[in-house]
Amino acid sequence: MTKNDNFFDKVYDVARQIPFGRVTSYGAIATYLGSARSARMVGWAMNNSGNQQPEVPAHRVVNKKGLLTGKHHFDGTNLMQQLLESEGIKVIDNQIQDLDTVFWNPMNEL
């Protein structure tokens, strides 16, 4: 196992703990894992999360401003948004609404 695989596994472990109806950011996961400058690496992990078991709720990971920057990695044009909306999260123009209310910070929660 390479260092990246190990980091990716840690990212998946954190992402699997994001509660239904909540979101977190790439940077929040990276900071929690002690790699604050690795938000992009968390994004790469999310990009590769589709073939992980158990499933990784990658739709719950957005950028620090609440933008659905990873949506092009989901099947269909609006699947990421639809998954979030099915959990009660309001999205307008690829932007999470009331981000402060639905944001889940692993530093505080885990």
Image: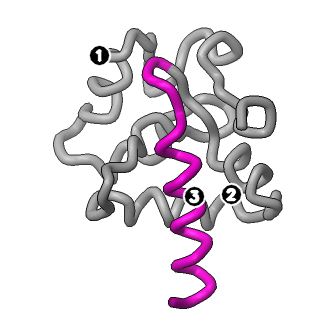
Mark 2, secondary structure of its residue:
helix
Applied colour scheme: one colour
Placement of 63 over or under 1, stated as above or below: above
Q: In the rendered structure, find residue 11 and report the number of the disc placed on it.
A: 3
Q: In the rendered structure, find residue 44 and report the number of the disc placed on it.
A: none
Left or right side of 91 for 38 = right
Mark 1, secondary structure of its residue:
helix
On-image quarter of the C terminus: top right
Disc with the residue nearer the chain's start (1 vs 2): 2
Disc with the residue nearer the chain's start (3 vs 2): 3
Left or right side of 86 for 30 = right
Q: Amino acid at mark 1?
A: Ser
Q: Amino acid at mark 3?
A: Val
Q: Residues within 10 Å of mark 2 (few under 14, many from 20)?
A: some
Q: CA distance from mark 3 to mark 2?
A: 10 Å
Q: Residue, x 65% and y 27% (percent of image)? A: 104
Pointer 2: what residue? 39
Range of residues picked out in magenta: 1-21
